[in-house]
Image (spheres, coloured by chain):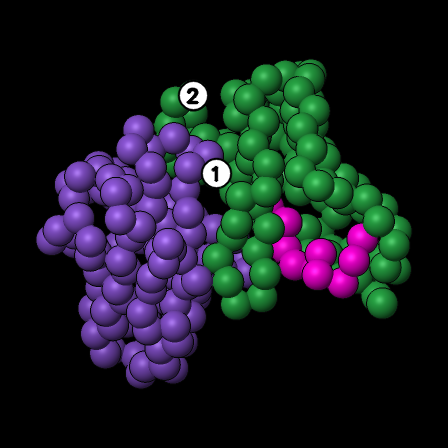
Amino acid sequence: GQQLNQSPQSMFIQEGEDVSMNCTSSSIFNTWLWYKQDPGEGPVLLIALYKAGELTSNGRLTAQFGITRKDSFLNISASIPSDVGIYFCAGPAWAGSYQLTFGKGTKLSVIP
Amino acid sequence: DAGVIQSPRHEVTEMGQEVTLRCKPISGHDYLFWYRQTMMRGLELLIYFNNNVPIDDSGMPEDRFSAKMPNASFSTLKIQPSEPRDSAVYFCASSLPLGRADTQYFGPGTRLTVL
């Protein structure tokens, strides 16, 4: 099946710094989703992307759908302590599918 | 809105025991998904239902796992007999009609530990 590779696996940053993480696939995705999982909770959808090249923002978060359709990027500006958590990329297992394939996640730690 | 409700939040059991995890989807959602999360394998889809009917159970690891959805507001995931390698966090998610991938809402999960 399709696999999503996220990098970095983990990162430690100072409060106020910007964060960048990405997700790549060996196959094409038609939708890219970014989720955040807080400790002890389920994933929550942050941003959904539907078109190659699309750039979408949600507050301090910005995500981009790569032109090749095989990658996506998530940026967080001016990080704050509540940004701590695991960020997952995900996409439908195949076009039109209801099944999601998830990356292994990027664990973000913010040092106050 | 209450969101997806899962119970119990934590379960500790001994190998060989039966375990039942429960999920109440968001009212009006007609798709329900069961996922398992482990450090090694990440988040994996086990099975999903549409209008209470199982659509794809290809992710269910083996016959020890079974899932039911007797009505639109309740689903169970059962493991019998349980094994230590079943230890994981199990999530239930439900989705708006049409079941679009970007409309899945996850519950808080059940952390299962099998000793």
Pointers 1 and 2 within a single chain: yes
The percent coordinates of residue A75 (x first, y second) are 76, 39
Q: Amino acid at mark 1?
A: Thr
The percent coordinates of residue B59 (x first, y second) are 33, 45
Residue A106 lies left or right of residue A48; in this view the side is right
Secondary structure under tag 2 reads loop
Q: Is B24 inside the magenta-drawn segment?
A: no
Task: Please tell me how crowded label 1 is: few (under 14), some (14-19), or many (20+) other residues with Cα within 10 Å.
Answer: many
- Which mark, residue A101? 1
Of the chain colours in the picture, the one used for chain B is purple
Secondary structure under tag 1 reads strand
Residue B87 shows in this picture: no
Q: Which residue is mark 2?
A: A95
Task: Please tell me how crowded label 2 is: few (under 14), some (14-19), or many (20+) other residues with Cα within 10 Å.
Answer: few
Report which quarter residue A65 is drawn in.
top right
Q: Amino acid at mark 2?
A: Ala
- Which mark, residue B88? none
Residue A39 shows in this picture: yes
Of the chain colours in the picture, the one used for chain A is green
> Alpha carbon of mark 1 to alpha carbon of mark 2: how far?
12 Å
The percent coordinates of residue B36 (x first, y second) are 41, 56
Q: Residue at x 71, y 56 (%)?
A: A83
Q: Residue at x 33, y 37 (%)?
A: B96
